[in-house]
Amino acid sequence: MRVAVFINKNKLTALHDKQISVVVFDIENDKVVGVENLTLEEQYKKSIENWLKHKSINRIYLSEIDNRTYEKLHLNGVEVKTAEALENDGLFKSLALIIS
């Protein structure tokens, strides 16, 4: 599984923010086996589902998302987790330790 965390200044961010860093984790058997740091360029924000598909990302974490984009991603098989749903997310808590 590949998981992407969208951040700006070490905090979760939304897709509409100007500068977005994306930390991509490769996870196998519940262990992080690889990490990639990327910058989401402006041209990819409008077709985020294609960018995620190209990067083989299955799940994303971000601060917030609009319903239309959420539905597009969901239809493309991408699981979306926003800040309000992260309180009990064990995977996110363990990844947050790696980012900080």
Image (cartoon, grey):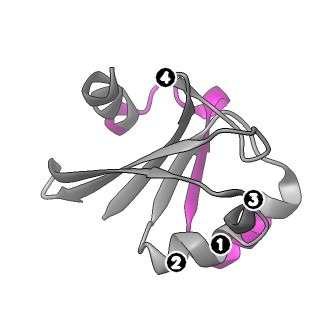
Give residue 49's mark. 1
Q: Which residue is mark 4?
A: 10
Q: Is residue 46 magenta?
A: no
Q: Which residue is mark 2?
A: 53
Q: CA distance from mark 4 to mark 2?
A: 24 Å
* Magenta range: 70-91
32 displayed left or right of 10: left
The vertical placement of 45 against 77, above or below, is above
Marks 4 and 2: which is nearer the front?
4
Packing grade of label 3 (10 A; few <14, some 14-19, many >=20) is some
Tell me the kind of residue under disc 2. Answer: Lys
- Is the C terminus in the top left, top right, bottom left or bottom right quadrant? top left
Give residue 70's mark. 3
Q: Position of residue 39 (x, y in %)?
A: 52, 50
Residue at image location 73% in from the left, 38% down from the top: 64
Q: Secondary structure at mark 1?
A: helix
Packing grade of label 4 (10 A; few <14, some 14-19, many >=20) is few
